[in-house]
Amino acid sequence: MWSEGTIGVKNEDGKYTAVHYWCKHFDEPSEEYGIDGGRISKLMLKQDGTVVYNYDRGLDIAPQTKEAEQALAILMHEHN
């Protein structure tokens, strides 16, 4: 199943930064393709039009910002 949306992540200034995501997740975990052996097999995060994280059956781009790290943690909790 594909999910798409935006997460508002509070930045260091106390303001919210929009992190857009596209996530492909399944009902069952995958040791081979899932993030940390979980249910998410594809995940892209964009911040201000720039890809700040990408996982496509393997890590392509590690989190580039603190907001990306926080959005990743939220999505891992929700879908993985």
Image (cartoon, rainbow, N blue to C red):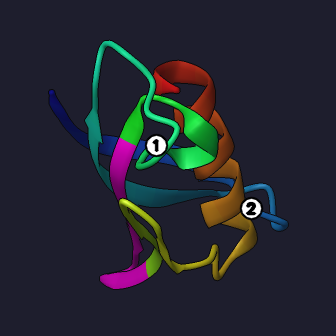
Residues rendered magenta in the picture: 41-51
Q: Residue furthest right?
A: 12
Judging depth in this view, the residue of 40 and 19 nearest the camera is 40
Q: Residue furthest left?
A: 1
Magenta region, main secondary structure: strand
Q: Is residue 43 magenta?
A: yes
- Checking the image for residue 34, the label placed there is 1
The reply to whether callout 2 and callout 1 are in contact (CB within 8 Å) is: no
User: In this rendering, is residue 28 above or below 11?
Assistant: above
Quarter-wise, where is residue 12 in the image? bottom right
Residue at the spot 52% in from the left edge and 38% down from the top edge: 31
Residue identified by numbered label 2: 11
Q: Is residue 75 magenta?
A: no
Taking 8 as reference, is 25 above or below it?
A: above
Looking at the rendered image, the disc whose residue lies closer to the viewer, 2 or 1, is 1
Q: Quadrant of residue 6?
A: top left
Instruction: Classify 1 as above or below 32.
Output: above
Name the amino acid, label 2: Asn
Residue 4 lies, in percent from the top left, at 21, 41
